[in-house]
Image: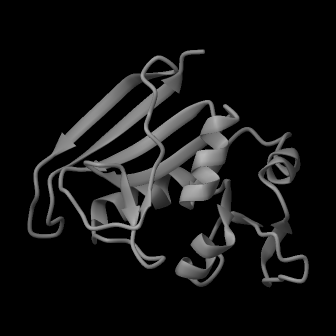
């Protein structure tokens, strides 16, 4: 199963200047819990914004740069190559960025979406693709109010592919 996992603002905002535009510890904790012990697939910019391979996960980086190397990571040059690499795994996660999300959604590669919806408008320069509710069905939702650690109201939403 391939899951796209992302945190987005009310208008599908993802980030700005290759960085997150909010700090939501609950989302980071959930991301770690869900992706631990699995493969995470990301574009080079997403990897560079993280800065290192995440513990207890296999990192696959997609880049067009054929000489790009990062110790502790697998390097591929297309999303298809990444998908081929993980074809025998039970679970893998596409973690961004915007270009990788868009391609995965257009090519219908994911079985599930795990979305953290941050209930706020943000100034962003990259956006998550619009979720087509004819192709995706919401199967679970947990809503949370802002608190001392999490500055914004947010929801954890899981979608399953309908078609």
What residue do we see at 68% from left, 58% from top? 41
What residue do we see at 19% from left, 50% from top? 119
Q: Position of residue 148 (x, y in %)?
A: 9, 69
Decide: is 111 above or below 127. Answer: above
Q: Is residue 157 left or right of residue 109?
A: left
60, 102: nearer the viewer: 102
Q: Position of residue 53 (x, y in %)?
A: 66, 76
Decide: is 109 above or below 155. Answer: above
Q: Is residue 43 left or right of residue 121?
A: right
**Number of marks in the image?**
0
Quadrant for residue 9, please give it.
bottom left
Q: Is residue 36 visible?
A: no
Q: Position of residue 99 (x, y in %)?
A: 61, 57
59, 36: nearer the viewer: 59
Instruction: Point out the image quarter for the C terminus.
Output: top right
Residue furthest to the front: 125
Instruction: Point out the image quarter for the N terminus.
Output: top right
Decide: is 2 above or below 76. Answer: above
Q: Is residue 27 visible?
A: yes
What residue do we see at 64% from left, 36% from top? 106
What residue do we see at 67% from left, 53% from top? 38
Q: Position of residue 18 (x, y in %)?
A: 48, 76
Q: Is residue 90 left or right of residue 35?
A: right
145, 69: nearer the viewer: 69
């Amino acid at each position: 199963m391939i899951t796209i996992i992302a945190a987005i603002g009310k208008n599908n905002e993802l980030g700005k200047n290759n960085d997150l535009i909010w700090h939501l510890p609950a989302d980071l904790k959930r991301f770690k819990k869900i992706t631990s012990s699995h493969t995470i697939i990301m574009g080079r910019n997403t990897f560079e914004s993280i800065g290192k391979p995440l513990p207890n996960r296999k990192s696959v980086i997609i880049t067009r740069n054929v000489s790009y190397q990062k110790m502790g990571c697998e390097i591929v040059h297309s999303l298809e190559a990444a998908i081929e690499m993980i074809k025998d795994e039970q679970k893998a996660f596409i973690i961004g960025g915007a270009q990788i999300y868009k391609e995965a959604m257009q090519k219908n590669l994911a079985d599930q979406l795990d979305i953290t919806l941050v209930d706020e408008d943000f100034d962003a320069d990259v956006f998550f693709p619009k979720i087509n509710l004819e192709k995706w069905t919401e199967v679970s939702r947990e809503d949370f109010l802002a608190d001392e650690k999490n500055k914004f109201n947010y929801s954890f939403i899981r979608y399953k592919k309908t078609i």
